[in-house]
Image (cartoon, coloured by chain):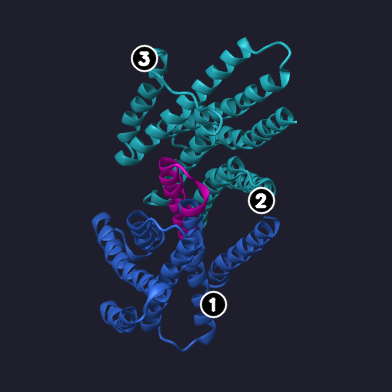
Amino acid sequence: MIESFENAFQLIVAGGCLIYSAIKAISNRNRVWILLLFFYAEIFLGNLYWQLYLIFFNMSPIYSFVSGFCWDVSFAFMLLLVRYYSKGSISIKKDPLLLVIPVFTAAMAVMFMQWGDIAENIVTAVLMAALILRCVVGLKEIAGKGAYAPAGKTGIYEADRSPAYLYRAILCFCTANYLSWIASTFFFEESITNPYYWFDTAITISLVFFIPALNRCDKSIKETVE
Amino acid sequence: MNYIENIYICLAAPILAACIFLRGRSRRVMIFMLAGISMCLLSSYVSTFIAAAYGADKLTATIEITPTIEEIMKFLPILFYVVVYSPKEKDETAQMVMVTAVGFATFENVCYLTANGAGKLLDLAIRGFGTGVMHVVASVLMSMGMIYLWEQLWIRVLGTIGLLSLAGAFHAVYNILVTQPGYVAWVGYLIPVLTAVLIVMVKKQYVGRT
């Protein structure tokens, strides 16, 4: 019951975000909004499929091809979106600390493989590593530019800084995802005390923050152009 | 017993003959129609094989395995066309994607007719429109990414895989709904039609403002 309720909540939130991003994509005709629209569409359809399965068959899907594929691809769309703002190269040689990210996602994938599909876990780990790396590198780029920005050129400074909100929102989303996956491997009971439901709700809440973050990027770029 | 190979031969023969005599764009349309029909036949083999490999029953295969397989198979002819011939006309390529989907849906509907009879006109009309439009809408989603949205190759590949999964999920949701009895199935048949109307409205607005 609680799984169904929580899933329905995420479905409604993703649906609302999908409609908003569709309106923005049509009115702006901007590719970043189209990518965000696809991201929400993947989350929405993956959840809708899962929810319908729960309603009609009283259980989760036996093989999670459809929903799993959708959720993995949503990370890919988010990665494509981030690529529009963070174009710097990722160099492990220059910054060896970045290596922690792929090592972490690979270790998590190996752990999850004990219960789940091998190929799906590899794809998820690769996409998650790429997404987190891109966001961390983006934040580092901004930190660098912020420090060296000329005092008078606030417009350019703002335009460069604005994607930081998007990167932080994505990092929160990725963290909530990992926490929910870890929780789902150790806690199975269908009750409010199960941390999986808390972290899944955190994912739902983090979904909403992509819209103001992208609006902020849009707004600051327009201000810079003006 | 449903002899889909026999149905395939009956449907493919006139199209194949037309392909020999026609030239230019008309011939391309016929080839893609035939490709759609052929992919539908092949996808039934692939789905059956994967369902058997996983030990899935008919219902589970229909709602969990078939949608993704069908969308991937339907996409292969156009992928071949784009990779091998590198067509310059984007609109025409998008139209060929739709022709493939029409061929696919036609074969699927004919197989449904032979398996379930052609007695109930209203049910068949709803089913025919629902399935036909669903395949076309799913193809439109895929062609958008591959043909229009992205310039760089790796982004186009990743984006197209993404839209393939979107089309598969759309198809899977449709399949879940139409396998249910009563009004739920009707809702399932209506969803692709409403989505198609929405796409046409958005396209009109988009083209109108360009």
In this orientation, which residue lies closer to the viewer: A97 or A111?
A97
Q: Which SS type dominates the magenta stretch?
A: helix
- Whether residue A117 is visible: no
Mark 3 crowdedness (10 Å alpha carbons): few <14, some 14-19, many ≥20: few
* Residue located at (72% from left, 18% from top): A154
Mark 1 crowdedness (10 Å alpha carbons): few <14, some 14-19, many ≥20: some
Question: Chain in blue?
Answer: B
Question: Chain in cyan?
Answer: A
* Residue located at (41% from left, 28% from top): A129
Q: Are marks 3 and 1 in contact (CB under 8 Å)?
A: no
Report whether mark 2 lies on the same chain as mark 3: yes
Left or right of B86 in this view: B166: right
Q: Which residue is mark 1?
A: B126
Report whether mark 2 lies on the same chain as mark 1: no
Protein chain holding label 2 = A
- Residue B72 x/y as whole percent: 37, 57
Tell which circle, 2 or 3, labels the residue nearer the N-terminal end.
2
The alpha-carbon separation of the residues under discs 3 and 1 comes to 61 Å
